[in-house]
């Protein structure tokens, strides 16, 4: 097939998913029923898994694009400005009039654990038309897609794949055809997500990776926080340890991992080497507040 796209429309990685505003508060403990916990001043910053991954990829030296929808509101404009500042290609980030952007409410406890509640904006969810338009006009060496998106856009992407490498992330939407997992080159999940997919507890992440591989993906990576990551692929399996570091905030650590991993794989770096770099990227992220940039106080 002849590809008539301009070379300028080519990127290393296209990230398909959601972008939102992160509203973060540091708390001494989570509020108990009937009680109030007093925390830090509220901060607002650009966030969302696909956005975090795209910004990390760009800062890792990759040419990254984001495919997502936002509301044409104050938050939406703040988010697009943050993407532009980070060097992310935003040609396929659509601002929808008279629509509120999504938001994530993030509580961070003293041990660095983050508790996230996502306030979805249904009008900003990607559609099959969005996917078709973006992938037709954008060539990418790798595509990373959030599998928890509505099944229609994910099905469109996986059924008409154009990129040499397709990476799936997160627990698939309940209505997504499980047979589509076989169209993934790589599935990347954390231990909690692996347990949800397998409907069991996960002890050894390497065993979980092997079990997930039997569902169809050629390669599976299971991240395990301070214990690094485990992987299995057609040529073998293994683990990658994580360095011991002080933990301030775990928000976005998995996204930093995946953003770096996707760029390196798009540039044909062997999986074990790419995973080592990705684990260190995640370890660096947990040592400061916020997913990728300093936050600003909400107004």
Image (cartoon, rainbow, N blue to C red):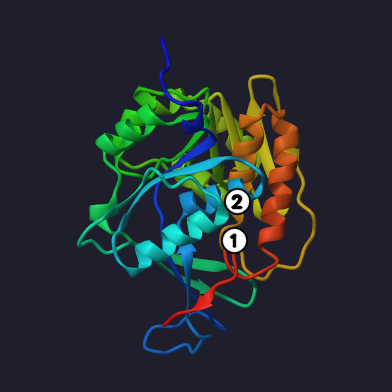
Residue 166 is at least partly visible in this image: no
Measuring from the top left, give residue 163's x and y in whole percent.
Answer: 48, 25
| SS for dot 2 | helix
Judge by depth and name the residue closer to the eye, 196 or 279: 279
In which quadrant will I find the N terminus?
A: top left
Taking the spot 50% from the left edge, 32% from the top edge, the residue there is 8
User: For mark 1, does the 10 Å Cα neighbourhood hold few (<14), some (14 to 19), or many (20 or more) residues?
Assistant: many
Q: Quadrant of residue 225?
A: bottom right
Residue 63 is at least partly visible in this image: yes
Residue labelled with disc 2: 56
Q: Is residue 187 above or below residue 241?
A: above
Most distant residue in the right direction: 244
Measuring from the top left, give residue 40's x and y in whole percent.
Answer: 53, 85
Q: Quadrant of residue 221?
A: top right
Sequence-earlier tag: 2 or 1: 2
Measuring from the top left, give residue 98's x and y in whole percent.
Answer: 20, 62
Most distant residue in the left direction: 98
Taking the spot 60% from the left edge, 41% from the top edge, the residue there is 222
Judge by depth and name the residue closer to the eye, 237 or 77: 77
Q: Say which mark, if any, is on residue 152.
A: none
In which quadrant will I find the C terminus?
A: bottom left
User: Residue 292 vs residue 99: left or right?
Assistant: right
Most distant residue in the top direction: 1
Residue labelled with disc 1: 292
| SS for dot 1 | loop
User: Residue 56 vs residue 124: left or right?
Assistant: right
Q: Are marks 2 and 1 in contact (CB under 8 Å)?
A: yes
Q: How far is mark 2 from mark 1, CA to CA?
A: 7 Å
């Amino acid at each position: 097939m002849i590809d008539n796209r301009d070379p300028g429309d080519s990127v290393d990685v296209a990230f398909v998913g959601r972008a939102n505003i992160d509203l973060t508060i540091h708390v001494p403990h989570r509020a108990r029923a009937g009680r109030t916990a007093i925390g830090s001043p509220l901060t607002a910053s650009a966030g969302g898994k696909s956005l975090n991954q795209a910004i990390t990829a760009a800062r890792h030296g990759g040419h990254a694009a984001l495919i997502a929808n936002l509301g044409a509101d104050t938050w939406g404009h703040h988010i697009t400005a943050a993407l532009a500042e980070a060097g992310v290609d935003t040609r396929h980030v659509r601002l929808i009039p008279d629509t509120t952007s999504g938001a994530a409410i993030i509580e961070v406890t003293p041990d660095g654990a983050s508790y996230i509640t996502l306030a979805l904006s249904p009008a900003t969810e990607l559609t099959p038309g969005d996917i078709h338009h973006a992938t037709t006009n954008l060539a990418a060496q790798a595509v990373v897609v959030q599998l928890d998106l509505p099944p229609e856009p994910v099905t469109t992407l996986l059924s008409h794949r154009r990129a040499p490498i397709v990476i799936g992330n997160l627990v698939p939407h309940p209505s997504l055809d499980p047979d589509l997992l076989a169209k993934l080159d790589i599935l990347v999940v954390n231990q909690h997500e692996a347990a949800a997919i397998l409907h069991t507890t996960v002890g050894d992440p390497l065993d979980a990776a092997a079990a997930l591989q039997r569902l169809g993906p050629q390669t599976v990576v299971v991240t395990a926080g301070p214990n690094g990551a485990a992987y299995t692929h057609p040529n073998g399996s293994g683990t990658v340890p994580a360095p011991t570091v002080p933990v301030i905030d775990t928000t976005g650590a998995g996204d930093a991992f995946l953003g770096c991993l996707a760029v390196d794989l798009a540039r044909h770096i062997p999986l074990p080497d790419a995973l080592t770099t990705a684990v260190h990227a995640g370890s660096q992220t947990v040592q400061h507040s916020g997913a990728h940039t300093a936050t600003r106080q909400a107004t």
